[in-house]
Amino acid sequence: MRKRGWNDEITETLKRRKKEAGMADRSEIDTMFAFIDIDEGRSATTNYS
């Protein structure tokens, strides 16, 4: 679940949400959870282990 939006059926939704939020160029936003964190002012967590 931590990788939701990364190379799955939600990937296109994540791309659209990033574009709508003006964050399309932010490569560190690779999951929906990272998007939500950054959108709410937190740093993105990318520890998938």
Image (cartoon, rainbow, N blue to C red):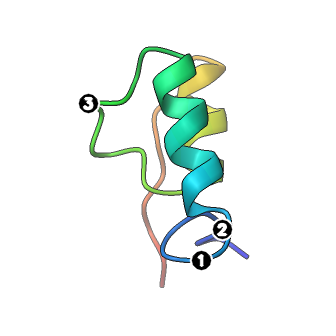
Please give the name of the residue rendered at 42% of the width and 60% of the height, measured from the top-left corner: 46
Amino acid type for the residue under numbered disc 1? Asp
Closer to the observer: label 2 or label 1? Answer: 1
Residue 49 pos. (x, y %): 48, 85
The answer to whether residue 23 is above or below residue 47 is above
**Corner quadrant of residue 16:** top right
Q: What label sits on residue 4 in the rendered view? A: 2
Q: What label sits on residue 8 in the rendered view? A: 1
Residue 38 pos. (x, y %): 53, 28
State the quadrant of the N terminus: bottom right
The answer to whether residue 49 is above or below residue 7 is below
The answer to whether residue 27 is above or below residue 42 is below
Q: Are marks 2 and 1 in contact (CB under 8 Å)?
A: yes
Amino acid type for the residue under numbered disc 3? Asp
How many other residues sit within 10 Å of disc 1, few (<14), some (14-19) or many (≥20)? few
Q: Which residue is mark 3?
A: 25
Q: Earlier in the sequence, mark 3 or mark 2?
A: 2
In this rendering, would 14 be left or right of 30?
A: right
